[in-house]
Amino acid sequence: MRVLVREEHNARVHLAASLCAVATGAVLQLSVGEWRWLVLAIALVWLAEAFNTAIEDLCDRICPNFDPAVGRIKDLAAGGVLVASLAAAAIGLLTLGPPLWERVSALLG
């Protein structure tokens, strides 16, 4: 994971998002059930990013020159990260949104 974060820009973006989600969950004092969803969402994105990076590195090692088939494989792996990220964003919104909205409403109202 250290190599992933050190060498991949997107992994650093995922790290920042993960830390923000955990910090927000801590401030909102999420229930155990809510934490389960948040942890699942974070893990889903990290798994997808790690697999995507491994697939891309393997493709680059096997075929250093451009090959449309390899490009398609890499695009499919990146699409998996996109799907995982969208699912995680939805889980984050559904998990953090209501208690966050409640806090903001209390401050404003």
Image (cartoon, rainbow, N blue to C red):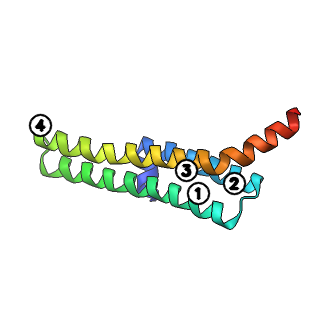
**Mark 4–mark 1 CB contact (< 8 Å):** no
The residue located at (44%, 41%) in the rendering is 9
Q: Residue furthest top?
A: 108
Spatial CA distance of label 4 from label 3 is 34 Å
Amino acid at circle 1: Leu
Q: Mark number for residue 25? A: 2
Q: Quadrant of residue 70?
A: top left
Q: How many marks?
A: 4
Choose the circle earlier in sequence order: 1 or 2: 2
**Mark 1–mark 2 CB contact (< 8 Å):** yes
The residue carrying mark 1 is: 38
Choose the circle earlier in sequence order: 1 or 3: 1
> As drawn, is 108 to the left or to the right of 35?
right
Amino acid at circle 3: Ile
Say which of marks 4 and 1 sits in front: 1
Secondary structure at badge 1 equals helix
Secondary structure at badge 3 equals helix
Up-down relation of residue 13 to residue 1 (above or below): above
> Residue 12 in the image: x percent, y percent?
50, 45
Spatial CA distance of label 4 from label 1 is 37 Å
Q: Residues within 10 Å of mark 2 (few under 14, many from 20)?
A: many
Question: Quadrant of the image for the C terminus?
Answer: top right
Spatial CA distance of label 1 from label 2 is 8 Å
Choose the circle earlier in sequence order: 4 or 1: 1
Amino acid at circle 2: Gly
Q: Residues within 10 Å of mark 3 (few under 14, many from 20)?
A: some
The residue located at (58%, 48%) in the rendering is 92
Secondary structure at badge 2 equals helix
The residue carrying mark 4 is: 68
The residue carrying mark 3 is: 91
